[in-house]
Amino acid sequence: MATFMFIINPKKKIPVSILFGLYIHSFLEGLPVAEVMSQGHNSGSFLGFKDSMILGLTLHNIPIAIAFVTMLKQLQIAKNSAILYLILFSLMAPLGVLCNELMKQAGVANIDYIIQISLGIVVGIFLHISTTIMFESSNNHKYNFAKMASILLGSIVAYLIS
Ligand SMILES: [Zn+2]
């Protein structure tokens, strides 16, 4: 994978760990979507589990895409390479959905178990990313009121809508 990236752009390098983390995260969270899609009809609630799952995935990928492109720009990655990285990123979740379907058709046992583990990893990665952004993005790892207030607000909103 690393050599592949150097071929795309021999001068500017992108941290492979960030790229891998992002892609794996996106791929893994695509896995359970196939499961909800195959369950078909939504329940009677305002947004069924199927819709809210896909909506949630779509919405949370918007800020991720913005942050990803911002990072690529800061690293001065060539525009063509940046577009390629973004396209690859957008393919990861659908690939996860496809992978789940293929596993089902191949008759892989314990798919539910695999999904439980992948969801655990997805949530873990997400917690790591968010805490890194929230607590380690400023100098000296300072806490400030705006950050704490937004964390509190986010927690309250999450509690209210769940
Ligand atoms: Zn995610």
Image (spheres, rainbow, N blue to C red):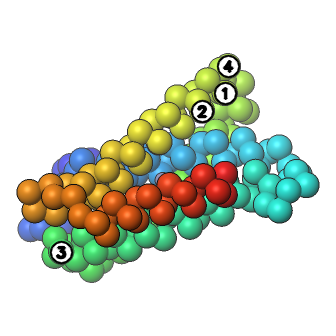
Q: Nearer the viewer, mark 3 or mark 4?
A: 3
- Residue type of the residue flagged with mark 3: Gln
Q: Is mark 1 within 8 Å of ligand 1?
A: no
- Please give left or right for residue 33 compared with residue 62 in the image: right
Task: Answer above or below: position of 153 versus 116.
Answer: below
Mark number, residue 112: 1
- Residue type of the residue flagged with mark 4: Ala
Mark number, residue 74: 3
Circles 1 and 2: CB atoms closer than 8 Å: yes
> How many other residues sit within 10 Å of disc 2, few (<14), some (14-19) or many (≥20)?
some
Mark 1 residue element: helix
Question: Camera-side residue: 150 or 21?
Answer: 150
Task: Answer above or below: position of 98 versus 69.
Answer: above
Q: Which residue is mark 4?
A: 109
Give the residue displayed 61% in from the left and 23% down from the top: 113
Q: Of marks 2 and 4, which one's residue comes earlier in the chain? A: 4
Q: Is mark 4 within 8 Å of ligand 1?
A: no
Label 4 to label 1: alpha-carbon separation: 8 Å
Mark 2 residue element: helix
Please state the horizontal and vertical placement of residue 83, each as a whole percent of the image. 36, 74
- Residue type of the residue flagged with mark 1: Asp
Q: Is residue 69 visible?
A: yes
Q: Which residue is mark 2?
A: 115
Please state the horizontal and vertical placement of residue 138, each as a whole percent of the image. 16, 63
Task: Answer above or below: position of 10 versus 118.
Answer: below
